[in-house]
Image: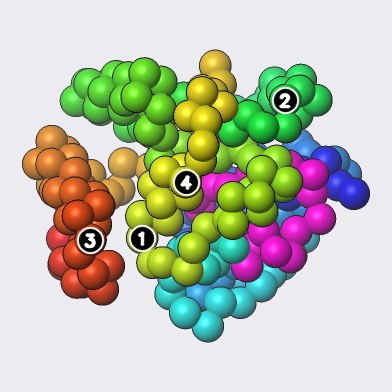
């Protein structure tokens, strides 16, 4: 069995994917990279093939489904779920290796950093890292490192198009098993660049509240992608 399986859901990520796959090249023979695409019309799949990733196709644009397809087709002892527009440091794999030899019940996530030099993003980083560390509420864009036994014991990501990370982490019995690594993940600022970041954060909070109150994900999804 491979040590790790890195699972990346994609849709038209040709501009971002080469950067992330270059960062992941340090795993060499220690693991596999799995791309689960849901209908890209650009060169995403070609790029994945060039870098030697395994490619699977989702018939639906549904991130929860994509992630679960990747997990079910993986061979790694540890599953690492990443978004395609993230970057890692050159020594990331060396630094997480000791954790992969530890407690299999622990779920790790990276320190939240935004790949933009504007001061306003430093404020957002502080708020997100505080929420993640002290309230045990990391999100999927921070990267999630989960032992395969823990993933499947908790029934994995459900087939839902958004909130799949919140849904999965809410089902965990022991929030103390969520642990932040002292290692950054650099997230693209693209989703905040066309809006006020605090207004966007408030909108995201409202989407989560509506979902937790039982509103249909179909209606939330429709509003989410109107932004």
Disc 3 packing (10 Å; few <14; some 14–19; many ≥20): few
Q: Is residue 76 magenta?
A: yes
First-in-chain label (1 vs 4): 1
Q: Position of residue 158 (x, y in %)?
A: 49, 63
What is the C-alpha distance between the residues marked 2 and 4? 19 Å
SS for tag 1?
A: loop
Query: Which of the two residues, 90 or 176, is positioned nearer the viewer here?
Result: 176
The residue mark sitting in front, 2 or 4, is 4
Q: Position of residue 141 (x, y in %)?
A: 43, 43
- Locate residue 8 relative to residue 136 in the image: left or right: right
Residue pointed to by mark 4? 171
Comparing marks 2 and 1, which lies closer to the viewer?
A: 2
Q: Nearer the viewer, mark 3 or mark 1?
A: 3
* Tag 2 residue: 103
Q: Residue at x 79, y 44 (%)?
A: 77
What kind of element bears circle 4?
Answer: loop
- Give whichever of discs 2 and 1 has the lower sequence position: 2
């Amino acid at each position: 069995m491979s040590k790790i399986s890195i699972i990346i859901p994609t849709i038209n990520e040709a501009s971002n994917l080469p950067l992330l796959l270059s960062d992941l090249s340090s795993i060499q023979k220690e693991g596999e990279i799995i791309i689960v695409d849901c209908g890209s019309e650009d060169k995403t799949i070609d790029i994945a093939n060039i870098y030697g990733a395994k490619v699977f196709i989702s018939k639906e644009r549904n991130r929860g489904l994509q992630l679960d397809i990747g997990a079910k087709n993986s061979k790694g002892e540890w599953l690492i779920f990443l978004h395609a527009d993230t970057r890692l440091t050159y020594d990331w794999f060396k630094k997480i290796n000791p954790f992969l030899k530890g407690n299999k019940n622990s779920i790790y996530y990276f320190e939240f950093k935004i790949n933009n030099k504007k001061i306003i993003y430093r404020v957002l980083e502080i708020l997100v890292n505080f929420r993640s560390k002290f309230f045990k509420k990391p999100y999927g864009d921070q990267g999630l490192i989960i032992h395969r036994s823990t993933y499947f014991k908790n029934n994995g990501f459900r087939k839902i198009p958004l909130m799949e990370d919140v849904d999965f982490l809410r089902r965990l019995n022991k929030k103390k098993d969520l642990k932040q690594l002292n290692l950054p993940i650099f997230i693209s600022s693209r989703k905040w660049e066309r809006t006020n970041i605090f207004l966007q954060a408030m909108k995201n909070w409202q989407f989560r509240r509506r979902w937790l109150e039982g509103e249909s994900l179909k209606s939330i999804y429709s509003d989410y992608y109107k932004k």
